[in-house]
């Protein structure tokens, strides 16, 4: 009993340390966004403000195009998620249920494209987007984000789909259901936990992407949140209060999205990790 109790205590202690290590920067960001200017740069820094102030949020909305940044990021993030899942679910279903020429080569290509970081693929992807005239457009960034997130989504979905028994599809086919009907009415409802889990990851990757958005979107009315945050850092000043405010606001959509799908998220991750 004693070793079991000690192992549980050690497990909880490590979990608490990890939560503190990850959560404290977020806590500090939120608290700093609510501090008045007189307390933001005091030394030693105070953990909690003496009073709650929303001056940084007021200046953020008055002095910047924060609403436009959020709108652009939301359009790009949701569009990337929908397109990536629409293509990824079809491709992953085909990979797990059918054999076709070039299947191994296709999987290898998807894996290799996921292995290389975005900065390595940047020049070639940019040349393609520029050649088809999509620079300076939201759709050009959406296309780039789909290229970056599709390999990840494909391999995650493939892992999830392999945990669903193939016999269910075969039974539907024997009963006369078409491939499309089987996929939409039988397979997809069973795969929803995994699909929702991948949707969260894809949305967060697109929401936080900076490199392609900063180069492709040069117009102020087209910029996203990461690009907008970078512009608060200039050669003469770093507007920390506004950075903390917009950082807090940028975190909220991800938190809200996770709260809506949290009951599917853990089930999806577990089902993808355990194949039966």
Image (cartoon, rainbow, N blue to C red):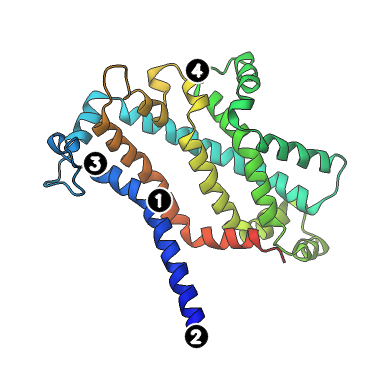
Which type of secondary structure does the marked residue at label 2 adopt? loop
- Give the foreground label among 3 and 4: 3
**Secondary structure under badge 4?**
loop
Question: Mark 4 highlights which residue?
Answer: 136
Give left or right: position of 115 versus 235.
right
Q: Earlier in the sequence, mark 2 or mark 1?
A: 2
Residue 174 can be seen, yes or no = yes
Mark toward the viewer: 2 or 3: 2
Residue 234, x across and y down, in percent: 32, 19
- The CA distance from mark 4 to mark 1 is 35 Å
User: Which numbered disc covers residue 32?
Assistant: 3
The extreme bottom residue here reads 1
CB contact under 8 Å: marks 2 and 1: no
Q: Which residue is identified by label 1?
A: 22
Q: Residue beneath label 2, please? A: 1
- Image quadrant in which you'd find residue 90: top right
Lateral position of residue 194 relative to residue 27, left or right: right
What residue is at 28 percent from the left and 25 percent from the top? 238
């Amino acid at each position: 009993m004693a070793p079991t109790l000690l192992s549980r205590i050690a497990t909880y202690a490590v979990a608490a340390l990890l939560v503190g290590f990850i959560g404290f920067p977020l806590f500090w960001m939120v608290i700093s966004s609510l501090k008045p200017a007189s307390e933001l740069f005091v030394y030693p820094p105070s953990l909690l403000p003496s009073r709650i102030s929303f001056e940084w949020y007021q200046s953020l909305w008055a002095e910047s195009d924060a609403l436009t940044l959020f709108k652009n990021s939301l359009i790009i993030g949701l569009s990337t998620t929908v397109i990536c899942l629409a293509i990824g679910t079809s491709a992953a279903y085909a990979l797990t249920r059918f054999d076709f020429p070039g299947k191994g080569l296709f999987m290898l290509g998807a894996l290799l494209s996921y292995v290389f970081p975005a900065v390595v693929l940047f020049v070639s992807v940019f040349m393609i987007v520029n050649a088809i005239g999509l620079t300076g457009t939201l759709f050009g960034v959406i296309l780039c984000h789909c290229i970056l997130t599709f390999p990840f989504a494909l391999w995650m979905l493939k892992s999830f789909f392999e945990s669903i028994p193939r016999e269910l599809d075969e039974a539907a086919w024997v009963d006369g259901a078409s491939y499309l009907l089987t996929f939409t009415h039988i397979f997809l409802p069973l795969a929803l936990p995994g699909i929702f889990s991948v949707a969260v990851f894809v949305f967060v990757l697109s929401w936080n992407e900076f490199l392609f958005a900063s180069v492709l979107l040069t117009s102020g009315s087209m910029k996203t949140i990461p690009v907008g945050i970078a512009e608060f850092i200039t050669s003469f000043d770093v507007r920390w209060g506004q950075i903390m405010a917009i950082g807090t606001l940028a975190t909220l959509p991800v938190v809200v999205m996770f709260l809506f799908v949290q009951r599917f998220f853990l089930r999806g991750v577990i089902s993808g990790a355990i194949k039966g």
